[in-house]
């Protein structure tokens, strides 16, 4: 029994030691785990602190670099401003010293031209002033080759001055010749001006024209707004059209291939002036008119194109004039509501101007058919409208103001289809015709 008790006690003692050993191992494992966790937390904290430090260092470095760049930029601007001020001061001194010599009427004109060229290169004189001075030199006897060299150096940026002068010359010549356009293509070699005093204007027109034609390549890569910005082109297009006139079809094609928008438009208008069957020119001009029909600036461009076609008396474009008048290619139905409000006030007058230009330019078969189609529609609208609706119809057709212009052109052209539709309109009931004053008289007596 005592042996059994001793055995059991030894067994208990061994189990207790085993439990204590296990507990010790658990405590050691827990301690190790806690130590590892603390180590990881410590390393994480160190990494975070390092990241913050790196970020702050990088930010400070960027701020330092940015401030350095700003200081450098300010320094460079100050240097440039100082140089500019110095240049302006020197230019002012040159202008004060040399401009009186240029304006001296008793000085040799060739010497003044060389002096002006120097001032242009030094940018003491801008190109607008240089153009005016050059014009006076030319009239004062500057030889042609010197004048060409002087004016050519004003291109391409000085094209505005060329355009303005073209317009001025057209007004100066207006009373002395049927049209300033006749001086460019004297087929018989005879000049078409009455007064000796117009000689300089004619020479100047030819000079400026030849300079532009001979330097067309200068406009290909030019960013001049006057000839490439649709919002500004209308201001200069008419003046350029007076100067840039082709002497033949080949020259017109060359002008039309210019990469400048304005020069190209004038080239295609010249092609139509020279060749009434140039379909490429006709299609190009029609597409230009269709572009952005709702734009205020495009409206001004269309206005100028109509004037130029009328000046050229280019029947090649008579169908375009007719389509503008009838609203076929200049139609507000493609406009958004806000756009309509912007252009509506002038819309009718552009159509009216086109109809009047058609009357002066003359018709061809295509425009005659377009006009007859419009008159047919007008006739059938009246016939299908009762007395109650006649007020609205009169407003729709603007009391037949454009219809009357087309009646004149169709009657003058004299086709059988034209006579037929005019006879039908003339026979409309008087109660309906009273809404369109003078229309019946136009058909009978024009």
Image (cartoon, rainbow, N blue to C red):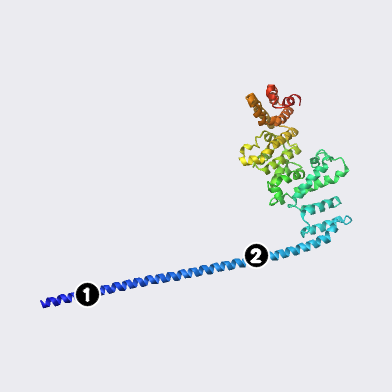
Check disc 1 and report its element: helix, strand or loop.
helix
- Say if 51 sits above or below 385 in the image: below
> Looking at the rendering, which quadrant does residue 349 occupy?
top right
Label 1 – label 2 distance at C-alpha = 84 Å
> Is residue 173 shown left or right of residue 82?
right
Instruction: Indicate the position of residue 22 as horizontal and vertical percent values.
Output: 26, 73
> Looking at the rendering, which quadrant does residue 398 occupy?
top right
Residue at 66% across, 65% down: 74
Task: Give the position of the N terminus as an image quadrant.
Answer: bottom left
Q: Name the residue under label 1.
A: 16
How crowded is the residue under tag 2: few (<14 C-alpha within 10 Å), some, or many (20+)? few
Q: Tell us which disc is closer to us: 1 or 2.
A: 1
Residue at 73% across, 45% down: 235
Q: How many labels does the image show?
A: 2
* Frontmost residue, 436 versus 249: 436
Of mark 1 and mark 2, the one earlier in the sequence is 1
Q: Is residue 147 visible?
A: no
Q: Mark 2 points at which residue?
A: 73
* Frontmost residue, 386 versus 100: 386
> Is residue 16 shown left or right of residue 209?
left
- Say if 207 sits above or below 78 in the image: above
Q: Which residue lies furthest to the right in this view?
A: 106
Residue at 29% across, 72% down: 26
């Amino acid at each position: 029994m005592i042996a059994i008790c001793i055995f059991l006690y030894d067994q208990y003692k061994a189990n207790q030691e085993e439990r204590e050993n296990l507990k010790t191992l658990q405590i050691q494992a827990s301690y190790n785990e806690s130590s590892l966790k603390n180590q990881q937390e410590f390393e994480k904290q160190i990494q975070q602190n390092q990241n913050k430090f790196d970020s702050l260092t990088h930010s400070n470095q960027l701020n330092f670099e940015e401030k350095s760049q700003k200081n450098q930029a300010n320094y460079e601007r100050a240097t440039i401003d100082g140089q500019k001020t110095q240049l302006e001061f020197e230019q002012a001194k040159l202008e004060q010293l040399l401009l009186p010599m240029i304006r001296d009427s008793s000085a040799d004109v060739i010497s003044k031209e060389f002096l002006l060229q120097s001032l242009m290169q030094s940018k003491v004189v801008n190109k607008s002033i240089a153009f005016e001075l050059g014009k006076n030199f030319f009239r004062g006897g500057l030889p042609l080759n010197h004048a060409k060299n002087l004016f050519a150096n004003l291109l391409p940026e000085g094209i505005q001055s060329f355009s303005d002068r073209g317009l001025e010359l057209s007004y100066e010549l207006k009373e002395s010749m049927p049209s300033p356009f006749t001086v460019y293509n004297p087929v018989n070699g005879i000049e078409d001006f009455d007064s000796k005093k117009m000689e300089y204007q004619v020479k100047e027109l030819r000079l400026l024209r030849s300079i532009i034609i001979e330097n067309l390549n200068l406009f290909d890569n030019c960013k001049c707004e006057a000839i490439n910005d649709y919002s500004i082109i209308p201001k200069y297009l008419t003046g350029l059209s007076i100067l840039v006139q082709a002497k033949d079809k080949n020259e017109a094609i060359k002008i039309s291939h210019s990469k400048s928008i304005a020069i190209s438009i004038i080239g295609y208008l010249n092609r139509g002036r020279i060749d009434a069957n140039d379909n490429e020119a006709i299609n190009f001009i029609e597409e230009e008119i269709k572009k952005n029909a709702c734009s205020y600036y495009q409206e001004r461009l269309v206005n100028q194109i109509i004037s130029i076609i009328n000046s050229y008396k280019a029947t090649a474009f008579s169908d375009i004039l007719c389509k503008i008048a009838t609203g076929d290619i200049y139609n507000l139905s493609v406009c958004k509501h806000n756009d309509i409000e912007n252009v509506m006030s002038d819309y009718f007058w552009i159509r009216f101007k086109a109809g009047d230009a058609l009357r002066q330019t003359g018709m061809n078969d295509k425009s005659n058919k377009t006009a007859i189609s419009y008159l047919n529609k007008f006739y059938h609208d009246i016939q299908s409208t009762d007395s109650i609706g006649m007020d609205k119809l009169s407003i729709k057709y603007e009391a037949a103001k454009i219809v009357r212009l087309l009646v004149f052109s169709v009657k003058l052209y004299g086709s059988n289809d034209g006579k037929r539709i005019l006879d039908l309109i003339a026979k409309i009931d008087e109660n309906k015709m009273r809404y369109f004053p003078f229309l019946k008289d136009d058909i009978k007596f024009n």
